[in-house]
C-alpha cells in the first residue's frame, strides 16, 4: 500500500494473491489492509489537504502535466501490468493507458478554469461573491474492468480541484492502482496527497464512508455495491458520485446502414470481452432487417480472435474469473431454455479456463434474464421489434440508464429517439463514444454525477457564498 508518501505492508502482515485471468496462476500478492490502514491514510490525506488545497491552480496543473508525461513514458509497462492482472488484449490495455493520460491532461487544463462569480448586490455597501473551493479528502473506490482509466477519472479532477485522495482499487486488479501511487510521487505530488489502499473491500469501504474527515465518496462499480456505499455515506452526509451498472440497448432501425451497425455492434458488445459498463446488453433489430443483421453480426463475430491478451492480434481475452464465466453460462442456459437460438458460439472456448466463445443469441425475448440483468460477458442477445415507439419503450424498460445506441439514417428519428431514450449517454450511428472531453455518467440506477468533460471537476468543488459588507463610505 502507498500511504503518506511511503510504501507499507498491512499491519497484520497479511497478504492476498493476485491472479492472471488468462492462466489462473498467481502473478503476485498485495497487502491485505483494512480499517486501521485506511484510517492512517485518511489522516495523512487530511494533513496534506491543509497545504495542498492552498497551492495555486498553476502549480497543480504543472504536477498533473508531469503525471501525464510520466504515464505516456511508461505506457507500455503500464499496459503490460494491466493485461497481466485484468486479461484484456494488449492493444486495448495500451488504449486504456492512453485514455488515462488523456483524462490527466484534460484536468491539468481544467484546473485553471475553476472560476467564481461576482453577483450584483441587492444592497448598498455590500459585494456578493460566489467562490469555488476544493471539497477536501476524497475516498475513491474503483472496479477491475478498467483499473487505470476509472482511477484517472477520479484522481485527475480531485487533484486539479486541490483535493487529496485515498484510493481503493479492485482486489482482482490492484497493481494498476498501485502504479498510480508511484507515478504521482514521481510527478511531485506531496506525501499524503494520493494514497492507495489494498485489502478488505468491506473494511476499507466502511472506514472511507464513515470517517468524518472524508468529505466525498466517488465510486465506480456495480449498482448493488453502489447502494451499500450510498447508505453508508449517508451517516456523515458525504458528497457522492456514483458510476454504476448498465443494461445498454442497441437499436437497429430498418433505415440503418446495416454494415455500419454491425461494425458498431461488434465494438459496443465485445470490447474488453463484453466487460464494460457501456457494453451492449440488448440488441433490438427492426423486423424488416432482423435476419440480415443477425447473419452479418454472426459472420463478424466468428472472425474475432480469442486468446491470452498478451498475444499479438488477440481481440478477446478471458473473463475476469470463473464466477463471471459461470454467470454467462447461466444466462445462456436460461435463454436457450426459453426459446433462444444460438447462432454462433455458445460454449467455453477450447482454450479452457476463463475463455468463452463470443456468442450470438437470436429470438431473444423479455422473459429471458439477460433482458434485465447486466451480462458483463461476450453474449449478444438479439431481440426483434416492429415500430419506433415499441423500440424506445423496450429500450427504456429497465432500472438502468447509462448508455444506449441506435442506428438510423433518418434525421427526425435521430432527434426523436435521442430525446426519448432515458440514458446518460446516447451513441447515434456510433458504438464507441467515450472521450475525456464529454460528460460520462448515467441516470436512474446507473448512478449520479458526471466524469470527464468540463463537468467532471464540479463534484470535487464546493460553491461558497461570501457577502462582503460595510463597504460604503459611511462605514469608514
Ligand atoms: N458506470 C461506470 O462508469 C462503470 C465503469 C466500470 C464498471 N462499472 C460497473 O462495475 C461493475 C463491474 O465492476 P466490479 O465487479 O469491480 O464491481 P463491484 O461493485 O463488485 O466492485 C467495485 C469496487 O467496489 C469494491 N467493493 C465491493 N464490495 C464493497 C463493499 N461492500 N464496500 C466497499 N467496496 C466494495 C470492489 O473491491 C471494487 O474495488 C459492473 O456492474 C459495471 O457495469 C460501471
Ligand atoms: O466500463 C466502463 C467504462 O467506463 C468503459 S469506457 O472505457 O469508459 O467506455
Image: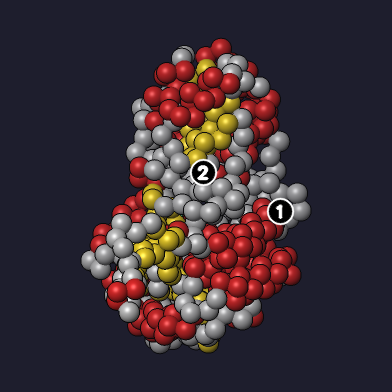
Q: Residue at x 53, y 33 (%)?
A: 405
Q: Where is residue 470 drawn, in percent x and y?
A: 30, 73
Q: Which residue is mark 2?
A: 278
Q: Is mark 2 within 8 Å of ligand 2?
A: yes
Q: Earlier in the sequence, mark 1 or mark 2?
A: 1
Q: Nearer the viewer, residue 425 or 332?
A: 425
- Examine the rendering and report whether any part of residue 466 can be seen: yes
- Looking at this rendering, what residue extends furthest in the right direction? 312
Whether pointer 1 and pointer 2 mark residues with C-beta atoms closer than 8 Å, the reply is no
Residue, far front: 474
- Which residue reaches farthest left? 235
Of 345 and 304, nearer the camera is 304
Circle 1 or circle 2, nearest the eye: 2
- Could you classify mark 2 by the number of other residues whose Cα lies within 10 Å: few (under 14), some (14-19), or many (20 or more)? many
Identify the residue under disc 1: 91
On screen, residue 199 versus residue 224, left or right, reads right
Q: Is residue 67 above or below residue 344?
A: below
Residue 142 coordinates in the image, percent (x, y):
47, 62
Q: Is residue 1 visible?
A: no
Secondary structure beneath dot 1 equals helix
Q: Quadrant of the C terminus?
A: bottom left
Taking the spot 46% from the left edge, 52% from the top edge, the residue there is 450
- In this view, the residue in front, 57 or 173, is 57
Residue 53 x %, y %:
47, 77
Indicate how the structure is coloured in the image: secondary structure
Residue under the image location 48 percent in, 32 percent down: 249
Amino acid at each position: 500500500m502507498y500511504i503518506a508518501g511511503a510504501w507499507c505492508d498491512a499491519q497484520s502482515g497479511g497478504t492476498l494473491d493476485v491472479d492472471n485471468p488468462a492462466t489462473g496462476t498467481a502473478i503476485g500478492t498485495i497487502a491485505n489492509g483494512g480499517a486501521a490502514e485506511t484510517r492512517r491514510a485518511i489522516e495523512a490525506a487530511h494533513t496534506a489537504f491543509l497545504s495542498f488545497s492552498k497551492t495555486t491552480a498553476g502549480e497543480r496543473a504543472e504536477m498533473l502535466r508531469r503525471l501525464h508525461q510520466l504515464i505516456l513514458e511508461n505506457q507500455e509497462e503500464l499496459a503490460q501490468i494491466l493485461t497481466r492482472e485484468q486479461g484484456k488484449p494488449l492493444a486495448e490495455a495500451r488504449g486504456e493507458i492512453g485514455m488515462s493520460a488523456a483524462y490527466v491532461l484534460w484536468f491539468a487544463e481544467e484546473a485553471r478554469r475553476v472560476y467564481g462569480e461576482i453577483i450584483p448586490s441587492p444592497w448598498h455597501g455590500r459585494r456578493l461573491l460566489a467562490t469555488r473551493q476544493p471539497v477536501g479528502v476524497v475516498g475513491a473506490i474503483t472496479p477491475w474492468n478498467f483499473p487505470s482509466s476509472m482511477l484517472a477519472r477520479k484522481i485527475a479532477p480531485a487533484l486539479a480541484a486541490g483535493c487529496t485522495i485515498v484510493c481503493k482499487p479492485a482486489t482482482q486488479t490492484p497493481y494498476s492502482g498501485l502504479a498510480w501511487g508511484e507515478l504521482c510521487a514521481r510527478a511531485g505530488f506531496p506525501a499524503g496527497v494520493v494514497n492507495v489502499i489494498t485489502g478488505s473491500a468491506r473494511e476499507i469501504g466502511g472506514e472511507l464512508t464513515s470517517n468524518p474527515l472524508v468529505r466525498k465518496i466517488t465510486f465506480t462499480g456495480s449498482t448493488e455495491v453502489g447502494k451499500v456505499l450510498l447508505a453508508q455515506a449517508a451517516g456523515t452526509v458525504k458528497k457522492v458520485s456514483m458510476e454504476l451498472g448498465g443494461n445498454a440497448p442497441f437499436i437497429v432501425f430498418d433505415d440503418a446502414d446495416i454494415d455500419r451497425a454491425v461494425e458498431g455492434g461488434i465494438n459496443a458488445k465485445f470490447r474488453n470481452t463484453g466487460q464494460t459498463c457501456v457494453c451492449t446488453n440488448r440488441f433490438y433489430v427492426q423486423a424488416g432487417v432482423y435476419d440480415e443483421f443477425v447473419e452479418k453480426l454472426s459472420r463478424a463475430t466468428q472472425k474475432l480472435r480469442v486468446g491470452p491478451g498478451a498475444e499479438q492480434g488477440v481481440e478477446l481475452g478471458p473473463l475476469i474469473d470463473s464466477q463471471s464465466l459461470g454467470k454467462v453460462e447461466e444466462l445462456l442456459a436460461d435463454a436457450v431454455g426459453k426459446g433462444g437460438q444460438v447462432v454462433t458460439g455458445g460454449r467455453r472456448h477450447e482454450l479452457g479456463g476463463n475463455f468463452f466463445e463470443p456468442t450470438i443469441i437470436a429470438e431473444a425475448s423479455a422473459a429471458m434474464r439477460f433482458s434485465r440483468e447486466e451480462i458483463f460477458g461476450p453474449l449478444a442477445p438479439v431481440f426483434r421489434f416492429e415500430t419506433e415507439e415499441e423500440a424506445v419503450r423496450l429500450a427504456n424498460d429497465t432500472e438502468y440508464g447509462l448508455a444506449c445506441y441506435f442506428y438510423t439514417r433518418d434525421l427526425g428519428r435521430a432527434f426523436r429517439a435521442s430525446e426519448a431514450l432515458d440514458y446518460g449517454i446516447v451513441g447515434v450511428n456510433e458504438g464507441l463514444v467515450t472521450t475525456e472531453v464529454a460528460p460520462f455518467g448515467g441516470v436512474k440506477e446507473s448512478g449520479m454525477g458526471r466524469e470527464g468533460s468540463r463537468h467532471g471537476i464540479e463534484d470535487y468543488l464546493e460553491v461558497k457564498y461570501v457577502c462582503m459588507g460595510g463597504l460604503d463610505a459611511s462605514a469608514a
